[in-house]
Image (cartoon, rainbow, N blue to C red):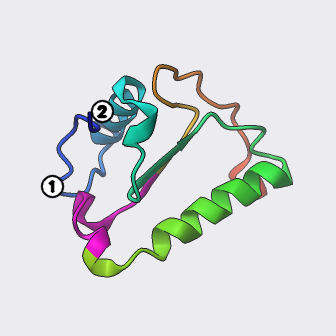
Amino acid sequence: MTIRIDVSRALATHEEIAALVRAVVAAQPEDELDWIEWKIAGDLSRRPTQGIIARHVLGLANRLPDRAALHAGGWGYLIMGAQPGSAPGITKVDPALL
């Protein structure tokens, strides 16, 4: 099974991102691909979790352009607080801490 959402172009609006999160919750763990990553986050104000976020952002940014362009217009998505079968959310954190 694959993530059931149209990724022929970038998903940018609030509604599109909410639909993406719903698609992640309905997905299977093996559906995680190089254009999307999901995590049930730890404490976003702590360095270990920030390191995980940074590693995934760098991974998304370092995809080969022609491969990246195959999904969502080349955009990459890091979904924090949701995974297949679960969406507990995250605790709010001051963006300055990230």
When asked about the image quadrant of residue 28, the answer is top left
Q: Is residue 70 left or right of residue 90?
A: left
Q: Residue at x 74, y 37 (%)?
A: 42
When asked about the image quadrant of residue 63, the answer is bottom left
Position of residue 89 relative to residue 47, above or below, is above
Residue 98 appearing in the image: no
Q: Residue at x 70, y 31 (%)?
A: 91
Q: Residue at x 18, y 57 (%)?
A: 9
Q: Decide: few, some or many residues near mark 1? Use Cα within 10 Å; few <14, some 14-19, many ≥20.
A: few
Residue matched to label 1: 8
Quadrant of the rendering where the C terminus is positioned = bottom right
Compare residues 73 and 63 and report the one nearer the observer. Answer: 63
Residue 61 appearing in the image: yes
Residue 32: give its label.
none
Span highlighted in magenta in the image: 67-77
Circle 2: residue type? Ala
Is disc 2 in contact with disc 1, using a CB cutoff of under 8 Å? no
Give x and y (percent) for residue 25: 41, 26
Give x and y (percent) for residue 50: 74, 55
Nearer the observer: mark 2 or 1; the answer is 1
Position of residue 59 relative to residue 20, above or below, is below
When asked about the image quadrant of residue 19, the answer is top left
Circle 1: residue type? Ser
Q: Is residue 54 left or right of residue 71?
A: right
Element under disc 1: loop
Residue matched to label 2: 19
